[in-house]
Amino acid sequence: MKINEKPFIAITMGDPAGIGPEIIVKALGLGRKWIHRHVIPVVVGDARVMAQAARIAKSDLKIYPINDLPTAVRHSMTINVLDLGNVRIDQLKHGRVDPMAGRASVEYIRKAAELARAGLIRAIVTGPVSKEAINKAHIPFTGHTELLAELMDRKEYAMLLAHGPFRVSHVTTHASLRKACEMVKKERILSVIRLTHQTMKELGIENPRIGVAGLNPHSGEDGLFGDEEKREILPAVEKAKREGIEAEGPVPPDTIFTKLKGKLYDAVVAMYHDQGHIPVKLLGFSLKKGGREWSQMGGVNITMGLPVIRTSVDHGVAFGKAGEGRANPQSMVDAIKLAIRFIQRKRR
C-alpha cells in the first residue's frame, strides 16, 4: 500500500441473526462521506444478509460483493462486502440463537484477523456476536478480545471501554467474580497499566494520568476488608511509577469513577468486568420514556496490545429488536470513528 493511499478497515458483520448487519448499514450511511474521506471500509460477512439488512434499514446504499480487497469500489454509496457466503438465508431467523449464525460470526473474525496478519488492513471494527450461538456451534468462545489475541499470538492484551473521554481498562473480563478475584495479580495489573498508558499516548495524550481501582470496598480499609490492595495492586502501581507512568492507586472503587468523570484521570484501570462496565454503560446508555427503547447506545470497546487496531460496539446482539429496523447504530458509528482516529494518529 502506498503512503498516500487510503487504508482498508474491516468491519465484521457479527451474528447474522442479530442487529450487527443493520447497524453497520446505518452507520455507513450516516458517516459515509467522512468515513470514505479517510478509509475504505469493507464488511467481512455475507452479502445476502447485508442486502437484507439494507432493505430493513431502508438504506439507499448498494451492496457490492467482493472476493478480495483490490476489487473493492471507492464509492461512498456502496458497501463493499467480502462475501464468505456462509449463511443459509432461507434458514436465518432474526432474534434467535442459531449455531449456523454463531459459526458464521466466528468465521468473519478469523477472516479479518487473517487480513490483519497479512498487513492488508489497518483496523478491525467488530459487530456484536452471541456467545451462546457460538458455543452451540461447538466452538469454545469467551469473547472477541480473547479470540483475536489468540489468532494474533498475543499474550499481553486487555479490554478498554471508552465513552468519549471516559475510558476504563480491565485487569480481568470474562471470568466468574470468584475467579476474577483470584486473577488480580501484580504482574497482570502492571501489564494493563502499561497497555493503558500506551493506548492513551496513541490517542494523543502526552502524559496520561491513570487511576487504578481497588478490588475491595474502601480499597480494603488497610486490610480490614481484604489485603489484595497491599499485596498485589499497590506494588504494581509503585512499579509503574518507577517506569515513569503517572499512576495513582489503589483508589476506592466507589469514588474513582467520579474522579475520572471530573477529569482527574485520563483513564482508569478496573479490576473486573462489571466494576468497569457499569460506569461506562451508565454514561453511554439511555432509555427512552417507558423503558422499551434505547435513546442512546454510546461507547466503544478497544482491544489493547494487538498488532492491529481493534474497536467494537459496546453492546450485544439485541435479539429482541433484530430485523425490525429500529436498532441504534450510535456505538458502531463511534467504533468506526475511533478506529479512524487511531489510524490518523499512527500515520503522523
Image (tube, grey):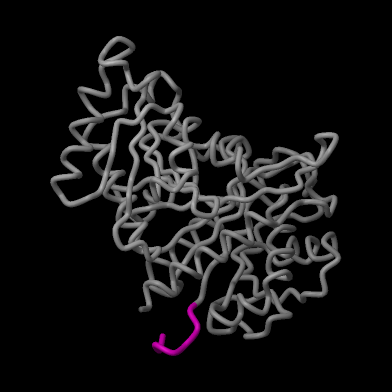
Residue 219 on image: x %, y %: 34, 22
Give the residue drawn at x 59%, y 82%.
37
Residue 146 sits in quarter: top left
Between residue 300 and residue 255, name the one nearer to us.
Answer: 255
Quarter location, residue 59? bottom right
In the rendered image, the quadrant that contains the C terminus is: bottom left
Magenta range: 1-7
Residue 49 against residue 296 in the figure, above or below:
below
Magenta stretch, main secondary structure, is loop
* Residue 121 covered by magenta stretch: no
Q: Position of residue 27 (x, y in %)?
A: 69, 64
Where is residue 181 drawn, in percent x and y?
36, 22
Q: Is residue 5 left or right of residue 220?
A: right
Q: Nearer the viewer, residue 133 or 225?
A: 225
| Quarter that holds the N terminus | bottom left
* Picture residue at 30% right of the left edge, 28% below the top: 184
